[in-house]
Image: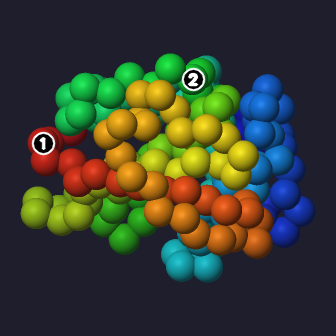
């Protein structure tokens, strides 16, 4: 069942098994607010078990580009297109959020972003490979983020 993320009344629906459930729900709401304000897009997620194509696409990019495998189970995912860019998000039980920005036009921007929920440790598989910058969010507290540029076709 899909869930239209509400960024006014933050809800942990679909994320209840996370040890940082409130922070992860705030992080997801922060993303929903961004897409609503910038693109007038309603950010809708579905259980990862129903979104295996999205989860597999993101996992494939991580493996192919950086030989990364995320240890935490995925809880929710979403995929959509706005203004010629394909976006995919996967929210993990650990509190990690991974997004893929993939321009459909050759030569456009393509990147993978990592965001860590407030209160979670940096996942072991990312700790030695990425530096995380901090940003404050009213919905999510302190978000730590990093990214890398996608070099291959996916």
Circle 2: element type: loop
Q: Residues within 10 Å of mark 1 (few under 14, many from 20)?
A: few
Q: In the image, which disc is placed on residue 152?
A: 1
Q: Is residue 61 left or right of residue 152?
A: right
Relative depth, front residue between 47 and 141: 141
Quarter of the rendering containing residue 120: top right
How did the renderer colour the structure?
Answer: rainbow
Q: Position of residue 112 (x, y in %)?
A: 35, 49
Instruction: Name above or below for residue 80 compared with residue 141.
Output: above
Instruction: Name above or below for residue 44 compared with residue 105.
Output: above
Q: Is residue 78 left or right of residue 88?
A: right
Q: Residue at x 54, y 39 (%)?
A: 122
Quarter of the rendering containing residue 7: bottom right
Q: Is residue 121 left or right of residue 84?
A: right
Q: Residue at x 13, y 47 (%)?
A: 151
Image quarter of the N terminus: top right
Q: Position of residue 66 (x, y in %)?
A: 24, 33
Image quarter of the C terminus: top left
Relative depth, front residue between 44 and 10: 10
- CA gap between label 1 and label 2 equals 25 Å
Q: Position of residue 28 (x, y in %)?
A: 67, 53
Residue 89 visible, this angle: no
Task: Identify the residue under disc 2.
Answer: 72
Relative depth, front residue between 120 and 95: 120
Quarter of the rendering containing residue 86: bottom left
Q: In the image, which disc is placed on residue 50?
A: none
Q: Position of residue 144 (x, y in %)?
A: 55, 56
Circle 1: element type: loop
Q: Residue at x 39, y 52 (%)?
A: 131
Q: Residues within 10 Å of mark 2 (few under 14, many from 20)?
A: some
Q: Residue at x 50, y 20 (%)?
A: 71
């Amino acid at each position: 069942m899909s869930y239209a993320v509400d960024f006014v009344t933050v809800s942990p629906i679909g994320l209840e098994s996370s040890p940082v459930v409130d922070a992860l729900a705030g992080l997801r709401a922060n993303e929903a607010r961004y897409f609503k304000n910038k693109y007038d897009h309603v950010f809708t997620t579905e259980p990862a078990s129903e979104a295996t194509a999205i989860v597999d696409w993101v996992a494939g990019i991580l493996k192919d580009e950086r030989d990364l495998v995320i240890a935490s189970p995925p809880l929710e995912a979403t995929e959509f297109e706005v203004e010629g860019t394909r976006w995919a998000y996967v929210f993990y039980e650990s509190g990690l959020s991974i997004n893929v920005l993939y321009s459909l036009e050759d030569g456009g921007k393509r990147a993978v972003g990592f965001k860590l929920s407030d209160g979670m440790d940096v996942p072991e598989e990312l700790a030695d490979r990425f530096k995380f910058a901090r940003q404050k969010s009213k919905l999510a507290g302190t978000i730590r983020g990093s990214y890398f540029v996608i070099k291959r076709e996916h």
